[in-house]
Image (tube, grey):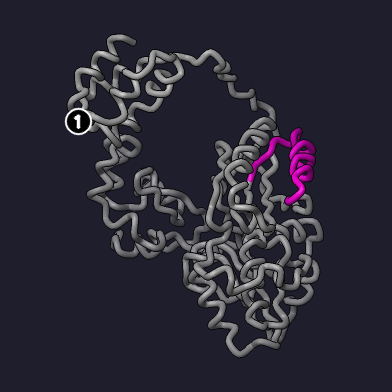
């Protein structure tokens, strides 16, 4: 410790803030512990001119605080079966309570081995999680114990795996970003919720089908959609709202139907339309996920064809065996989304098995193929500077079409 303090103090004139003061002011172990854990962050803000040796000194330096608990080994998950679940609820939450709610959810759900992605905001909660089957009852009891979420309905997937690596709970401005002033609509004005059976009956065998809007992103509809649905060519919910309003203009008294993956986007979109004066807005309760369960249970002919896109490692769950998508590289029939093997690129696109082998699990960009060939896919962020606008393209299909792959 004295050696490291001496190194820092020798640079005291060069770094007048933060670091030398932090270590020179006290001999308390917790302070040194903090510094040893956070040296790279401190250096990036205040002492970037220090030598790399100083960073190495602290990276290899570890002190435990007196009250620090020993790190627990990960649980043995062998033999576990998992359930993949989504749930959401629009409910007013105090902004100053969100951070404590985040920490509480993170701590309590990790204790029962739940993994996934949860967003909380002043308008409510949105979650996609995987839960060990033997902890399902504990998860249900826990969510019910939270007074503001006691009415939440679990929406079970049709394909159950451990779909996430770990649990993330994040505070967001909105759980569904719409780009609108929240004062311009009322979330209490909800659309009509149709059960999967009611939805199926209303939209089957229609000679004059009503307006049916797919409220998902364009790439989601590439691999699966409802018959007679309109799928706007947009890739954000904000743009979807604009197109929705254009499609519905002048139809204030006509029946309007909308659907999405699990229901949350339609709950908000329907509230926006209802706030605009539309009288007959209908949505599929539980979204495509619930409809897929209904079709499996009843064996009725499905009016949804293909796969239901999912925002997890599955990247889709089958509703029917129909393949309506096409490989973005060779245009052959395909319905499997993947991410470019070059993790700096990470482009999401549809790829057939033949192109997967030909382009080495990449999007086909020579930068990405080279990155995989040289083993730099995960270790060389400098490649990002040479890549072709990978952070600004709007979809894998559009980007790959610009590569002119042979």
Q: Nearer the viewer, residue 255 or 12?
A: 12
Q: Give the range drawn in magenta.
A: 129-149
Q: Which residue corresponds to mark 1?
A: 49
Q: Residue at x 58, y 57 (%)?
A: 175
Q: Nearer the viewer, residue 112 or 199?
A: 112
Which picture quadrant has residue 283?
bottom right
Q: Is residue 372 above or below residue 124?
A: above
Check if residue 288 falls in the magenta segment: no
Q: Is residue 106 above or below residue 54?
A: below
Counting labels gives 1
224 relative to 4 in the view: left or right = right
Check if residue 131 falls in the magenta segment: yes
Image quarter (top left, top right, bottom left or bottom right) of the N terminus: top left
Q: In this view, does 250 lie above or below 233?
A: below
Q: Which residue is drawn at 67% across and 80% down?
A: 256
Q: Which residue is drawn at 64% across and 61% down?
A: 264
Percent from the top left, x then y, of residue 91? 69, 58
Image quarter (top left, top right, bottom left or bottom right) of the C terminus: bottom left
Q: Which of 69 and 328 is in front in this view?
A: 69
């Amino acid at each position: 410790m004295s050696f490291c303090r001496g190194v820092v103090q020798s640079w005291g004139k060069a770094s007048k803030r933060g670091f030398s003061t932090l270590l020179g002011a006290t001999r308390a172990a917790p302070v040194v512990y903090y510094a040893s854990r956070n040296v790279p962050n401190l250096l990036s803000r205040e002492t970037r001119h220090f030598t790399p040796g100083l960073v190495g000194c602290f990276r290899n330096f570890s002190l435990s605080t007196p009250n620090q608990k020993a790190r627990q080994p990960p649980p043995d998950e062998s033999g576990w079966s998992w359930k993949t679940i989504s749930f959401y609820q629009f409910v007013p939450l105090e902004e100053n309570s969100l951070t404590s709610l985040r920490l509480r959810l993170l701590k309590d759900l990790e204790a029962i081995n739940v993994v996934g992605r949860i967003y909380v905001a002043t308008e409510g909660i949105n979650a996609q999680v995987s839960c060990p089957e033997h902890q399902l009852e504990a998860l249900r009891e826990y969510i019910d114990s939270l007074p503001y979420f006691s009415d939440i309905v679990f929406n079970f997937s049709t394909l159950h795996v451990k779909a996430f690596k770990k649990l993330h709970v994040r505070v967001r401005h909105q759980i569904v970003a719409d780009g609108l002033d929240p004062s311009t609509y009322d979330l209490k004005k909800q659309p009509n919720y149709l059960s999967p059976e009611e939805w199926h009956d209303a939209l089957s065998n229609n000679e004059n089908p009503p307006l049916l809007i797919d409220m998902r992103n364009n790439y989601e509809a590439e691999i699966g959609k409802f018959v007679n649905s309109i799928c706007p060519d947009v890739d954000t919910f904000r743009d979807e709202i604009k197109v929705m309003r254009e499609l519905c203009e002048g139809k204030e008294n006509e029946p309007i139907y909308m659907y999405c993956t699990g229901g949350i986007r339609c709950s908000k979109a329907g509230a926006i339309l209802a706030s605009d004066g539309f009288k007959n807005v209908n949505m599929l309760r539980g979204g495509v996920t619930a409809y897929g369960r209904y079709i499996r249970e009843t064996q009725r002919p499905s009016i949804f064809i293909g796969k239901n896109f999912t925002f997890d490692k599955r990247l889709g769950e089958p509703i029917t065996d129909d393949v309506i998508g096409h490989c973005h590289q060779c245009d052959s029939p395909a319905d499997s989304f993947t991410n470019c093997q070059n993790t700096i690129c990470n482009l999401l696109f549809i790829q057939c098995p033949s192109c997967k082998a030909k382009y080495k699990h990449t999007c086909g960009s020579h930068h990405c193929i080279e990155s995989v060939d040289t083993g730099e896919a995960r270790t060389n962020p400098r490649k990002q500077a040479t890549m072709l606008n990978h952070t600004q393209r709007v979809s894998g299909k559009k980007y790959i079409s610009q590569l002119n792959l042979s």
